[in-house]
Amino acid sequence: MNPDLAALHPYPFEKLRQLFAGVTPNPNYAPINLSIGEPKHPTPALIKAALTDHLNGLASYPTTLGSDALRSAIAAWLRRRYGLVDINPATQILPVNGSREALFSFAQCVLDRQQPAPLVLCPNPFYQIYEGAALLGGAQPYYLQTTAAQGWRVDYASIPEEIWQRTQLVFVCSPGNPTGAVMPLDDWALLFNKADQYGFVIAADECYSEIYFRADAPLGGLQAAQQLGRHDYRQLLMFTSLSKRSNVPGLRSGFVAGDANLIKPYLLYRTYHGCAMSPTVQAASIAAWNDETHVIDNREQYRKKFSAVTPRLAEVLNVQLPDAAFYLWAGLPAQFGLDDTQFARQLLEQYNVTVLPGSYLARDVNGTNPGQNYIRIALVAEATECETAAERIVDFIKTLKTS
């Protein structure tokens, strides 16, 4: 067996299962699960229709590059969404089976384990795929602490020279999971300058880009590159998918786009990897990328839920409306006397609501876990269920204050 497998950490939901072992939830309450970021809004009818109308695609082997029609639809969306007037669908776009598998496989493609002590930089808290991709690619993850005091932004300016010299890949997550923070243009500019200086590659995970709560849509990595005059998107790929945007997590459809000099070897890697997208899924994906009406409706549903739930929870937790994504990243006041794991376990036991301990989404660095005493609340269920869960959380916290 690959010895690197031994370095992998248990996935957060496996840790959650172990945490809840022996817990009997209060049967007086129907279960509400807000722990996993799985979209629950209905899949748009136009996507389902496109899928069933193209079932004949199951009779053909797909090409790894995907169809011209799909890459053209993606390019058109990138032009509308980010103003990328010069994106080339033939050389700068590659369909993938969801952003998760692409983020993982891209690291295996670009990391050079023959170099001494290679590093992969990722935010902390973070999406655990970044860590696993680094470890199985023969590199070590280097965790970049983010905190509420800095708006959950990575302080790239504070990274030591010797770390940059060993860095081969930087994972950016904007909007962030779990914090919802969006990376500003100044941070992109600094990171691009470092990439030019040290030669590393940037993987921009942007799968939450279409769920936002401010007037302006979140800045994307390719958009930032274009604004800064990097029209070749050098050393940068963006990763996104339809899962959250279009409520089709089971479709496993997304794309990577950016530097043609990265797309070309990654296409070669994927050709051997055997992960081409079914023509049937490609047809449904074209329908999704070509339509914005369902995306606007989806975003409005999230806005209404966050508008109802956030102020209520802010009365008892350290939480505020995020920039984007569909999570509330809520801090537990010290007077509760519970850490995030104890809070999650007792909330399930007493009120049958499941949330994810923040410490499961981060790593200890110099004795500090930036997710400690936070919980991640995924507002993915229907509005009434999310509001009911919020009221139960408030009631639970009231019992802590009076005990």
Image: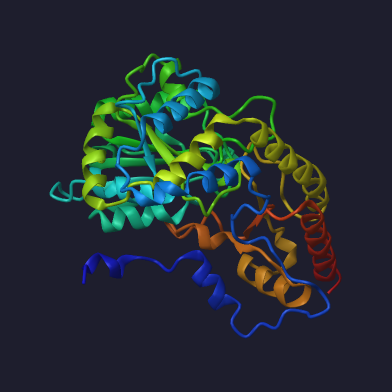
Towards the viewer: 280 or 11: 280
Tell which residue pokes out farthest to the bottom in this image: 22
Q: Is residue 54 above or below residue 2?
A: above
Q: Is residue 298 above or below residue 189?
A: below
Q: Is residue 151 left or right of residue 398?
A: left
Residue 49: x %, y % from top left = 59, 44
User: Can you say which quadrant of the picture contains the N terminus?
Assistant: bottom left
Image coloring type: rainbow
Q: Residue at x 39, y 15 (%)?
A: 86
Q: Residue at x 50, y 18 (%)?
A: 83
Residue 304: x %, y % from top left = 78, 42
Q: Residue at x 24, y 43 (%)?
A: 110
In the rendered image, which quarter is residue 198 located in? Answer: top left
Residue 44: x %, y % from top left = 64, 43
Towards the viewer: 108 or 56: 56
Res. 97 visible in picture: no
Number of numbered discs present? 0
Q: Is residue 75 above or below residue 203?
A: above
Residue 200: x %, y % from top left = 27, 35
Tell which residue pokes out farthest to the left in this image: 114
Q: Residue at x 28, y 33 (%)?
A: 263
Towards the viewer: 279 or 398: 279
Res. 195 visible in picture: yes
In the rendered image, which quarter is residue 181 located in? Answer: top right
Towards the viewer: 76 or 314: 76
Q: Is residue 213 left or right of residue 11?
A: right
User: Can you say which quadrant of the picture contains the C terminus?
Assistant: bottom right
